[in-house]
Image (cartoon, grey):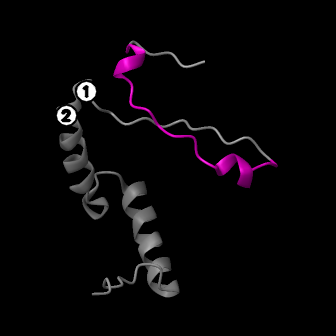
Amino acid sequence: MEVTDEAPEQRAHVPALAHHELTRDFRLEDVWTLPTPKRPEDFSRLVRRIASFDPARSSSCVVRTLFALRWKIGKLFGWDVRVSPRR
């Protein structure tokens, strides 16, 4: 059961994902939420906040370490190679 102080018309509609078809062996819970104010115009502020996040400068040693590890593994496997769009 979802507990919220927002009226139903204020909540953003999120389409159902097909992850349940991929995870039939276990139940997948969606437990995160975006910290947005209730006004629609504040969404762009949230996007700027997320885009400006620099994990290498995080105050958390754990966050810095996990991202450094991810970047090393990504470099090793070529996960983060940018592909330029076709013209």
Residue 53 image point, x, y percent? 25, 55
Q: CA distance from mark 2 to mark 1?
A: 6 Å
Where in the figure is residue 78, as x and y percent of width and height?
A: 47, 85
Q: Residues within 10 Å of mark 2 (few under 14, many from 20)?
A: few
What residue is rendered at 39% in x and 25% in y? 11
* Disc 2 residue type (three-letter): Asp
- Viewer-nearest residue: 44 or 54: 44
**What secondary structure is marked by label 1?**
loop
Q: Which residues, given as a range, are shown in magenta? A: 6-25
Image quarter in which the N terminus is found: top right
In the visual, does 18 lie left or right of 44?
A: right
| In the depicted structure, whether residue 12 falls above or below residue 44 | above
Q: Is residue 24 left or right of residue 87?
A: right
Q: Residue at x 37, y 19 (%)?
A: 9
Q: Which mark is residue 29?
A: none
Of the two numbered discs 2 and 1 on the same chain, state the one appearing first in sequence. 1
Q: Name the chief secondary structure element in magenta.
A: loop
Residue 39, how many percent across, how many down? 22, 26
User: Please, what is the three-letter code of the amino acid marked with disc 1?
Assistant: Pro
Tell me, for residue 37, which label it has, or none. 1
Placement of 17 over or under 73, stated as above or below:
above
Name the residue: 19% across, 49% down: 48
- Could you say which is closer to the camera, residue 11 or residue 65? 11
Q: Residue furthest right?
A: 25
Q: Quadrant of residue 66?
A: bottom left
Tell me the residue that label 2 is attached to.
42
